[in-house]
Image (cartoon, rainbow, N blue to C red):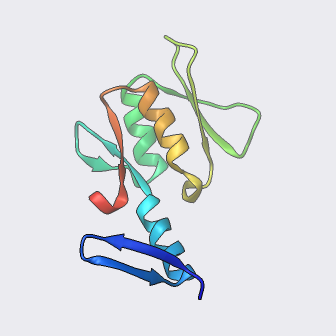
Amino acid sequence: MSGVWVFKKEGFRLMEKRQAEGKAHSLNQKILVHLPSGEVISSYSMLEQILTNLGWERYYGRDPQLYQFHKHSSTDLISLPKDFSKFTSIYMYDIVIKNPNVFHVRDMSTT
């Protein structure tokens, strides 16, 4: 009998390992939200438009696997994987830190 014990207010139960992994994965998924508009960032073109309006410019570096943005007014560089499906919370938090009060990372389950 293998699996994961799930505890809730109503009680507890044993969940199969595959089912538990699927639920954990969906609970851990994050989204990047543009706070002024309330929109969820769903593509790089959308993100690039917002970053450009904030003074960021595309940086064409040596790595063709990355989208990169920089600001002339700072030494900051935002590097993102070219494949949007690999745009994880690590990259989202990097954007949030470099653009305070403009973006927010949320759990997908709370939208």
Image quarter in which the C terminus is found:
bottom left
Quadrant of the rendered structure where residue 85 is?
bottom right
Q: Position of residue 108 (x, y in %)?
A: 36, 59
Image coordinates for residue 36, horizontal then vertical, percent: 23, 36
**Is 54 or 22 nearer to us in this picture?**
22
Quadrant position of residue 34: top left
- Determine which quarter of the picture holds residue 1: bottom right
Residue at coordinates 52% horizontally, 12% vertically from top-left?
74
Q: How many marks?
A: 0
Question: Residue visible at 40% across and 82% down?
Answer: 13
Q: Residue at x 32, y 31 (%)?
A: 102
Residue 108 falls left or right of residue 22: left
Instruction: Answer left or right for 75 relative to 8.
Output: right
**Residue farthest along the top direction in this orientation:** 73
Reply above or below: 41 against 12: above
Residue extending farthest to the right is 62
- Residue 75's place in the image compared with 19, above or below, is above
**Coordinates of residue 89 in the picture (x, y in percent):** 50, 47
Q: Is residue 8 above or below residue 65?
A: below
Lateral position of residue 64 relative to residue 103, left or right: right
Q: Position of residue 43 (x, y in %)?
A: 45, 53
